């Protein structure tokens, strides 16, 4: 059994770290040896219910032990797990099911009504007491692992859908193994570490925390959900030495009132992709945690990264061994260093990238993959994120980075969260619109917001429209759904600088 498959990772970790604590989730603690047994017995439970290698099994489950068992059990059986965003319902849930076409669906009592509502025709299992059809590990006999190959699909993971409809990505076994190796190296993880994540297990970030732990023999604590007010208390309770945050979570944590719990924990570094450069040092000084950035997506791997002892605020890092990256224009021609363009990436690591989207052909090995990210490469090889290509605002001949506008807005002492996006202009091209959330107990005057931007930004980037809102529409991973904001656009309560 090759270590470049998920069963290979589980088996090797159990052999080397058998009695070490691997997982704490949902009130359950598992050693590496127990995790192997749980994977094998879940595979037996799935097989007893008619599941076979190659079948797709959808999961509409929150962060709970059944989801981890299902991920590992499907891989052990040679089946394909399809973790679904627990916020999905109605049309969006139907879209995910229609695209992935699972034979089976495993959910929980609180979410089962959504599945019934969309008319899913496959076999449904519901976890919890009184659900005898649920595949509970330990009920049936354990199975030997199916001889999956590194390039076989282990999971179909859906993109966040922040700029358009979510797409199902075929993720092979080896991609998870490479994620584990690459991120463990970037974060300098060892068997003495405890990893704490509250990110959802239906996305790459949290799922690959499991692979990182198995790679080095560390312990991982998976929390139910993100809470800005309880984050550091939960990290301390977990005994975390490494934490996982997203750039959108950083200002939320900094917006909390300072207190003794800010440093009453063991964590000293964390993975924080997308963190605004201006907040890095502030975050480290307040919480004692050095953030490490990088570039990786559901479709790729950790192509660009840094390490705790060598990182730069606002930069993703440099290209890692086994990968290549270029910055290109609209014609896919390379642009000079210092010039913004789209990031394209490729790898010579076999099966380190996804094998494409559901229903599409597999890209050729070593082919360049478009990322949809606008970046700048400095002359010394360090990459800086500028914007999503679809989030770029074009106003009066100037390209405006929504990321830079948002960074300026977050520098305002009363702004907790901000999103910048384009809306239609009477003069063609775009106008800049922003939605801002005030800090708790603070108020925001749109006029003052615009004046602040005028002090921080070029005149062409100053927002014309300002919405002060109670909250932003977010995905389960904390990313802003800008498609929702663009669709809503200017309303009757929007402040207009030119009105």
Image (spheres, rainbow, N blue to C red):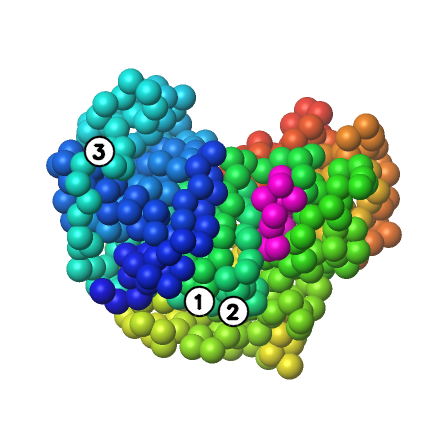
Identify the mark at residue 449; answer none if there is no mark.
none
Tag 2 near tag 1, CB within 8 Å: yes
Residue pointed to by mark 1: 181
Is residue 240 shown in magenta?
A: yes
- Label 2 and label 3: CA atoms lie apart by 38 Å
Front: mark 2 or 3: 3
Q: Is residue 477 above or below residue 125?
A: below
Residue pointed to by mark 2: 185
Q: Residue at image x 19%, y 45%?
A: 142
Left or right of residue 369, residue 450 in this image:
right
Residue 46 appears in view: yes
In the structure shown, which secondary structural element does the residue marked by tag 2 occupy? helix
Q: Residue at image x 74%, y 55%?
A: 288
Mark 2 vs 3, N-terminal side:
3
* Circle 1 crowding by C-alpha within 10 Å: few under 14, some 14–19, many from 20: some
Question: Going by the picture, which residue comes out furthest to the front?
Answer: 19
Is residue 32 shown in magenta?
A: no
Q: Residue at image x 64%, y 81%?
A: 380
- Label 2 and label 1: CA atoms lie apart by 6 Å
Identify the mark at residue 139; answer none if there is no mark.
3
Task: State which region is magenta.
Answer: 234-249
Q: Residue at image x 25%, y 41%?
A: 42
Front residue (pair 30, 273): 30
Front residue (pair 466, 239): 239
Tag 1 near tag 3, CB within 8 Å: no
Left or right of residue 248, residue 222 in this image:
left
């Amino acid at each position: 059994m090759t270590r470049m498959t998920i069963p290979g990772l589980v088996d090797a970790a159990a052999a080397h770290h058998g009695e070490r604590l691997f997982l704490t989730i949902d009130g359950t603690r598992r050693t590496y040896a127990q995790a192997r047994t749980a994977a094998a017995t879940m595979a037996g439970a799935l097989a007893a219910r008619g599941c076979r290698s190659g079948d797709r099994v959808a999961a509409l489950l929150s962060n709970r032990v059944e989801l981890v068992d299902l991920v590992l059990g499907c891989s052990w059986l040679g089946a394909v797990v399809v973790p679904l965003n627990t916020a999905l319902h109605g049309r969006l849930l139907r879209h995910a099911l229609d695209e992935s076409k699972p034979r089976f669906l495993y959910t929980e009592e609180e979410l089962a009504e959504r599945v019934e509502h969309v008319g899913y025709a496959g076999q449904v299992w519901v976890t919890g007491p009184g659900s005898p059809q649920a595949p509970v590990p330990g009920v049936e006999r354990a199975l030997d692992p199916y001889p999956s190959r590194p390039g076989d699909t282990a999971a179909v993971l859906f993109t966040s859908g922040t700029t358009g409809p979510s797409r199902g990505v075929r993720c092979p076994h080896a991609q998870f193994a490479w994620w584990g190796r690459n991120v463990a190296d970037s974060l300098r993880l060892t068997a003495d570490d405890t990893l704490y994540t509250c990110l959802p297990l239906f996305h790459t970030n949290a799922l690959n925390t499991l692979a990182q732990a198995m790679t080095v023999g560390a312990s991982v604590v998976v929390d139910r959900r993100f809470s800005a007010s309880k984050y550091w208390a939960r990290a301390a309770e977990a005994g975390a030495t490494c934490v996982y945050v997203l750039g959108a979570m950083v200002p939320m944590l900094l917006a909390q009132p300072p207190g003794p719990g800010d440093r009453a924990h063991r964590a000293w570094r964390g993975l924080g992709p997308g963190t605004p450069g201006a907040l890095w040092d502030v975050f480290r000084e307040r919480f004692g945690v050095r953030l490490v950035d990088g570039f990786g997506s559901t479709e790729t791997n950790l192509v660009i990264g840094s390490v705790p002892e060598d990182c730069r605020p606002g930069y993703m890092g440099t290209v890692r061994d086994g990968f290549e990256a270029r910055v290109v224009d609209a014609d896919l021609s390379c642009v000079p260093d210092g010039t913004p363009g789209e990031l394209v990436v490729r790898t010579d690591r076999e099966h380190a990238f996804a094998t494409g989207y559901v229903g599409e052909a597999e890209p050729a090995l070593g082919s360049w993959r478009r990322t949809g990210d606008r970046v700048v490469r400095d002359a010394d090889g360090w990459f800086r994120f500028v914007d999503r290509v679809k989030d770029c605002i074009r106003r009066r001949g100037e390209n405006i980075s929504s990321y830079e506008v948002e960074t300026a807005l977050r520098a305002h002492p009363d702004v907790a969260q901000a999103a910048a996006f384009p809306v239609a202009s009477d003069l063609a091209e775009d106008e800049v619109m922003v939605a801002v959330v005030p800090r708790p107990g603070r108020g925001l005057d749109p006029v003052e917001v615009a004046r602040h931007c005028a002090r921080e930004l070029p005149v062409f980037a100053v927002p014309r429209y300002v919405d002060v809102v109670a909250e932003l529409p977010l995905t389960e991973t904390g990313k802003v759904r800008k498609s929702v904001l663009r669709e809503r656009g200017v309303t009757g309560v929007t402040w207009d600088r030119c009105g």
